Amino acid sequence: MTGWRHELHRHPETAFQEQRTSDFVAARLGEFGVEVHRGLAKTGVVGVLRAGSSARTIGLRADLDALDVQEATGKPWASTVPGKMHACGHDGHTSMLLGAARYLAETRAFDGTVHFIFQPAEENEGGGRVMVEEGLFKRFPCDEIYGMHNMPGVPVGKFAMKPGAMMAAYDIFEIVVEGVGAHGAMPHHGVDPVLVASHLVTALQSIVARNVDPAQTAVVSTTQFHAGDAYNVIPQSAVLRGTVRTFDDSVQAMIEKRIRLLADQLCAGFGARVSGWRYERRYPPTINAEAETGHAARAAQALVGDAHVILNPTPSMASEDFAWMLREKAGCYLWIGNGAGPGSSCMVHNPAYDFNDEILGLGASFWATLVQQRLASR
């Protein structure tokens, strides 16, 4: 698994471009004697393994894609592709699921069908949604489905999961503030969109502070501000972009409405206007089912003991497109500790991040244990 992980890490591919990665996964599955299916969401791979006579089915999902990040780890297995790296550990997730597939294919110590789902485009582009829309669960029925992600800051040997919201919904927004361009020395002849947009950035923070119930959780972050090209020119327009994270549908709807209302009215108050508006609900919240979370917990406890399974972690405001699969099938999304303390990897999406090879065996063992428990002979 370490060799597989390093090979994948050297050759990162981003959303829907994971052709080499897909070929690698399909080749390994074929070597193990697992039935291979390709083509869902362009580069997705599904392996099917049957044993015994039971009609019960279980889905296990790993993500394939990398990020547009320039690697700075200096590792011997560092990315060979400029500007792209596995900065979130999907190379490790893929390797752990391949390891479980090999073990289960060799032992066949279960009764039913396992679907090994290797999903493209988890980062930003919703490959999980595309797989579902293209008939993932019609072609590969699953009674229950599970996903797992490494988590820096959680010690090696620990797992974390909870029923209910595990990860937040992911929305994006774009606001174009249209002013009146003018000479930078004569601002009274124009309407400065930079000034207006700056006030709007501050005003957007009032939504969470004054409109969201304090018992709820939400984040509104303006992450981009684009305006102007010259030192002495007040530009005609300014563009704001950002993200919204929520756990509750009603809070999500309220924030979308408030952003638009604030933008329209604040701009009007300065004599500007909103000439462009975009709001997209990219990923829903990741909601774990209670029963399936219990199943995942029991598999983890069988490996590491009750004391090392965290059953009420603080949900993350980051997002996960496994949420689309959980909207269709009951399941659980959990975290496996990637290490904590001195010498451990930094957080994901950082140029210095690297997946911890020490947890590869543990992750693969979790998948195998879960299958053997859920598809035990009756």
Image (cartoon, helix red, strand yellow):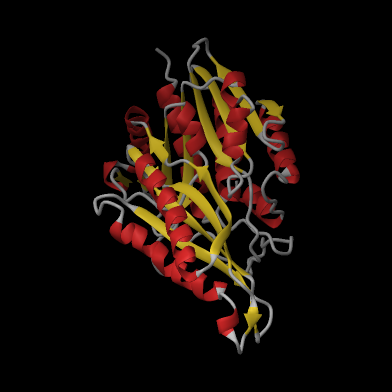
Q: How many marks?
A: 0
Q: In which image quadrant can residue 272 be found?
A: bottom right
Residue that appears at 48% across and 70% down: 270
Q: Residue furthest left?
A: 215
Q: In which image quadrant can residue 340 be found?
A: bottom left
Q: Is residue 194 above or below residue 255?
A: below
Q: Position of residue 87 (x, y in %)?
A: 58, 58
Q: Position of residue 170 (x, y in %)?
A: 48, 48
Q: Residue furthest bottom?
A: 185
Q: Is residue 290 above or below residue 185?
A: above
Q: Nearer the viewer, residue 38 or 342?
A: 38
Q: Nearer the viewer, residue 238 or 249?
A: 238
Q: Position of residue 55 (x, y in %)?
A: 50, 12
Q: Is residue 320 visible?
A: yes
Residue that appears at 49% across and 56% down: 243
Does residue 27 appear left or right of residue 182 in this picture?
A: right
Q: Position of residue 233 (x, y in %)?
A: 66, 82
Does residue 317 appear left or right of residue 1 in this picture?
A: left
Q: Nearer the viewer, residue 94 or 177?
A: 177
Q: Is residue 145 visible?
A: no
Q: Is residue 136 above or below residue 56?
A: below
Q: Residue furthest top?
A: 53
Residue that appears at 30% across and 53% down: 212
Q: Nearer the viewer, residue 52 or 208?
A: 208
- Which quarter of the rendering shows the C terminus? top left
